[in-house]
Image (cartoon, grey):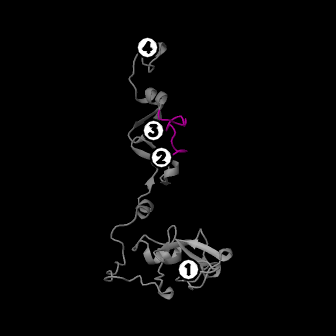
Amino acid sequence: MPNWGGGAKCGACEKTVYHAEEIQCNGRSFHKTCFLCMACRKALDSTTVAAHESEIYCKTCYGRKYGPKGIGFGQGAGCLSTDTGDHLGLNLHQGSPKSARPSTPTNPSKFAKMMVDVDKCPRCGKSVYAAEKIMGGGKPWHKTCFRCAICGKSLESTNVTDKDGELYCKVCYAKNFGPKGIGFGGLTQVEKKE
């Protein structure tokens, strides 16, 4: 039977969709008022629609029904959702139920380890966090504590030396721990004559 004067049939209500009110999605036509999520009935547009075969959903409901399942697949950054989608008619509990998680974590996260295993500065004894950490002598130091133990000069990788867990500039290290005698800066000509 010919389709006289009309358009395609709406994918939701099966009534004729005229060009002025038509929204196309996934090769099908919809009325603007029928272009709704099949689960939550939220109005959709080209940026919020997610199609699956002949069904249309908002991105949230689509993710709940067809997206990845399990721990770590929340609805947003760092989200832990307990919403099962049952109130929307989404059957998310397919297959055998998972065993309950233990109440205490058996493998703590990197963040938990980082908070427990914070390094201590050898100079001041306070915690050294990554943003302020400088390594010297195999130990972490605060930027403000990374100074010569004798003269207090700020140190860099090019002028630092370490001895017995303490940091020194090269000049102070040479004066106090370097070789002694004529030509090494330890004894002067006046001291030699005596």
Which quarter of the image is occupied by the N terminus? bottom right
Query: Mark 3 to mark 1: distance in Å?
Result: 66 Å
Which residue is at a point 55% across and 80% down the rendered structure image? Answer: 37
- On whether residue 16 falls in the magenta region, the answer is no
Residue that numbered label 1 is attached to:
37
Residue that numbered label 4 is attached to:
192
Q: Which mark is residue 133?
A: none
Q: Is residue 94 above or below residue 51?
A: below
How packed is label 4: few (under 14 Cα within 10 Å), some, or many (20 or more)? few
Q: Is residue 12 above or below residue 148?
A: below
Q: Are marks 3 and 1 in contact (CB under 8 Å)?
A: no
Q: Nearer the viewer, residue 122 or 73?
A: 73
Mark with earlier residue (1, 4): 1
Which residue is at a point 44% across and 18% down the rendered structure image? Answer: 187
Foreground disc of the pair 3, 4: 3
Foreground disc of the pair 2, 3: 2
Q: Nearer the viewer, residue 147 or 101?
A: 101
Where is residue 174 shown, x and y percent of the image?
A: 44, 26
Q: What residue range appears in magenta? A: 141-157
Q: Secondary structure at mark 3?
A: strand
Query: Mark 3 to mark 4: distance in Å?
Result: 31 Å
Badge 1 amino acid = Cys
Query: Mark 2 to mark 4: distance in Å?
Result: 41 Å
How packed is label 3: few (under 14 Cα within 10 Å), some, or many (20 or more)? many
Residue that numbered label 3 is attached to:
167
Where is residue 141 shown, x and y percent of the image?
A: 47, 46
Q: Which mark is residue 141?
A: 2
Quadrant housing residue 43: bottom right
Q: Secondary structure at mark 1?
A: loop
Mark with earlier residue (3, 1): 1
